Amino acid sequence: MLNCSASILTLKLNVDIECGCADRDSICRNINNGNLNQIAIGICALLPSSALRCVTDLWLVVQDGSYQAQSNLKFLSILKDPCHELADAQPKDIPPMLPKILSLIRMIWVNSEFYNTKERLTGILRKVRH
């Protein structure tokens, strides 16, 4: 059953790749594309009901993952420039940079729907440390 649902998702990704639009944004758009969804639903309608449920569940997981990825990218992208500056800084220049970075991490923690757990926050701090 899962092979069919995986095949449908692979079909959608192959359409992205063949169209030359395999970047993250276009894949997210095409996952939510009404025409492709209708094709996938038409194929799934031919399946037994248990397979359709499996495909629908997998589809929801993919859409949720896409939403999470977009949200995470929005919040984490604010750290890009400060972390590049930190990576290029001399040791003596690092202490004054830390309050700004920690403030941005706190903003992510307070406002992000998905980076508000101890594990995710610890992960960000570990990555900044390296």
Image (spheres, rainbow, N blue to C red):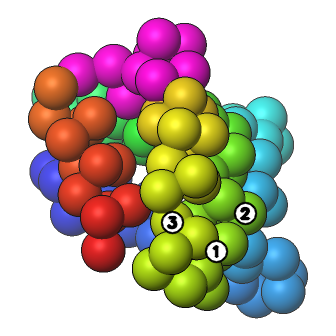
The foreground one among 102 and 33 is: 102
Please give the label number shown on residue 94.
Answer: 3
Mark 2 and mark 3 lie on one chain; the one further toward the N terminus is 2
Amino acid tagged 2: Asp
**What secondary structure is found at the residue carrying circle 1?**
helix
Q: Which residues fall within the magenta stretch?
A: 106-117
Which residue shows up at 38% across the image and 29% down it? 115
Residue 87 visible in the snapshot: no
Secondary structure of the residue carrying tag 3 is: helix
What is the distance, in whole Å, between disc 2 and disc 3 at their CAs?
Answer: 14 Å
The alpha-carbon separation of the residues under discs 3 and 1 comes to 12 Å
Q: In this figure, which residue is indicated by the disc labeled 1? A: 84
Check residue 112 for magenta coloring: yes
Identify which residue is drawn at 84% across, 86% down: 20
Q: Position of residue 47 (x, y in %)?
A: 31, 41
Q: Give the quadrant of residue 97.
A: bottom right
17 relative to 82, above or below? below
Q: What is the number of callouts on the image?
A: 3
